[in-house]
Image (cartoon, rainbow, N blue to C red):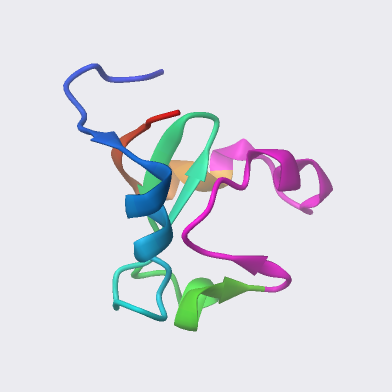
Amino acid sequence: MKDNNLPKISLRRLSLNNGQDKEVIWVAYDGLVYDVTQSRLWRNGKHYEHWAGQDLTNELKDAPHGIRVFDKFECVGILER
């Protein structure tokens, strides 16, 4: 569920939080942006063949886990299209 109190985050701002240019690591899924910085699985902005700083909505269908994986991360904003 989307919280209207969350800030809108542009694709550009999302891309800047990729774990390489900055230590902050964000990914987007289904219109929401999550901070995965503390996840050991996202070190250096890469998780298997997936790169941080982008919308991973279309890639999740191939993942061995479901959308509940995002429950453990802080939602930091709404992806602005």
Q: Residue at x 70, y 73 (%)?
A: 48
What x and y, as percent, mark residue 80? 38, 30
Label tally: 0
Q: Residue at x 73, y 70 (%)?
A: 49
Q: Is residue 63 magenta?
A: yes
Horizontally, is 55 left or right of 81 in the view?
Answer: right
The reply to whether residue 3 is in sight is: yes
Horizontally, is 47 left or right of 1 in the view?
Answer: right
Q: Nearer the viewer, residue 42 or 52?
A: 52
Magenta stretch in the rendered image: 48-68
- Up/down of 46 relative to 2, above or below: below
Q: Residue at x 35, y 64 (%)?
A: 16
For the N terminus, give its image quadrant.
top left
Q: Among all residues in the image, which is located at the extreme left? A: 5
Q: Is residue 73 magenta?
A: no
Q: Among all residues in the image, which is located at the extreme right? A: 62
Q: Quadrant of residue 81?
A: top left
Q: Quadrant of residue 10?
A: top left
- Up/down of 12 relative to 76, above or below: below
What x and y, as percent, mark residue 21? 35, 79
What x and y, as percent, mark residue 44? 47, 83
